[in-house]
Image: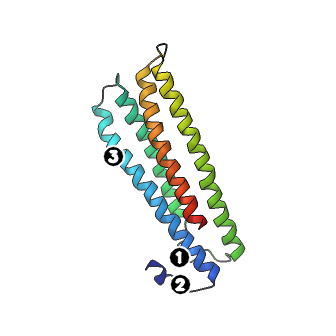
């Protein structure tokens, strides 16, 4: 439906425009996730007791939400769903598509790292010698949720853009 309003051109241009539309839609999902985190945790953060894990959970979610919102906004602004810049060639499109796929694949590997860090934080929180276990627990739970979402998001985006 949206592809019908795009200008006609060579096959590589239509494929690139489809790639950019998928990328923009995917980044919109990331932006919605960021806003959900900012709104929900932004609401609960000032209502949480600093001595409880919930405060640290919402604090970390707000930080992740801010970073994800910036990344989504910058990514959306850099897409070219209509006509690409002047002088843009088929090889430029192929290189851009390859690079975008590699970014999502690299991010998926980082997301696995986030999940490992979350596991370590939760393990440390359960230790009887842990200093401020409520902070470790809140941060660990937040990083686990964010890492899991981002892992699924990055793998789905990589797969969609690769297809």
Q: Which residue is mark 3?
A: 39
Please report the residue visible at 37 percent of the width from the left and 27 percent of the height from the top: 53
Q: Residue lying at the far right in this picture: please name it.
A: 91
Numbered badge on residue 82: 1
Dot 2: element: loop
> Does residue 113 sit above or below 74 in this rendering?
above
Q: Position of residue 62 (x, y in %)?
A: 41, 40
Element at badge 1?
A: loop
How far apart marks 1 and 3 lie (CA) works out to 32 Å
Residue at figure coordinates x 69%, y 71% from the top left: 92
* Left or right: 2 as drawn, with respect to 161: left
Check whether the beta carbons of the residues at disc 2 and disc 1 lie within 8 A of each other: yes
Is the C-beta separation of discs 1 and 3 under 8 Å?
no
Expressed as whole percent of the image width and height from the top left, the position of residue 110 reads: 60, 44
Q: Residues within 10 Å of mark 2 (few under 14, many from 20)?
A: few
First in sequence: mark 3 or mark 2? 2
Residue furthest to the bottom: 8
Query: Residue tagged by mark 2?
Result: 7
Image coordinates for residue 82, horizontal then vertical, percent: 53, 76
- The residue nearer to you, when weighing 85 against 38, is 38
Left or right of residue 47, residue 99 in this image: right
> Which mark, residue 62?
none
For label 1, count other residues whose C-alpha is less than 10 Å away and answer few (under 14), some (14-19) or many (20+). some
Q: Quadrant of the N terminus?
A: bottom left
Q: Quadrant of residue 41?
A: top left
CA gap between label 3 and label 2 equals: 38 Å
Q: Quadrant of the C terminus?
A: bottom right
Toward which corner of the image does residue 61 lie, by quadrant?
A: top left
Quarter of the view holding residue 162: bottom right
Residue at the top extreme of this rendering: 129
């Amino acid at each position: 439906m949206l592809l019908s309003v795009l200008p006609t051109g060579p096959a590589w241009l239509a494929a690139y425009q489809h790639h950019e539309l998928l990328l923009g839609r995917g980044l919109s999902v990331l932006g919605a996730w960021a806003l959900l985190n900012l709104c929900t945790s932004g609401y609960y953060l000032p209502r949480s007791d600093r001595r409880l894990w919930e405060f640290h959970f919402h604090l970390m979610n707000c930080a992740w939400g801010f970073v994800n919102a910036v990344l989504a906004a910058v990514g959306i602004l850099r897409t070219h769903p209509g006509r690409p810049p002047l002088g843009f060639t088929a090889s430029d499109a192929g290189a851009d598509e390859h690079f975008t796929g590699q970014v999502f694949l690299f991010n998926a590997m980082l997301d696995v790292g986030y999940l490992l860090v979350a596991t370590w934080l939760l393990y440390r929180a359960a230790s009887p010698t842990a200093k401020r276990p409520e902070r470790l627990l809140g941060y660990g739970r937040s990083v686990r949720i964010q890492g899991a979402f981002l892992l699924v998001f990055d793998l789905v985006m990589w797969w969609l853009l690769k297809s």
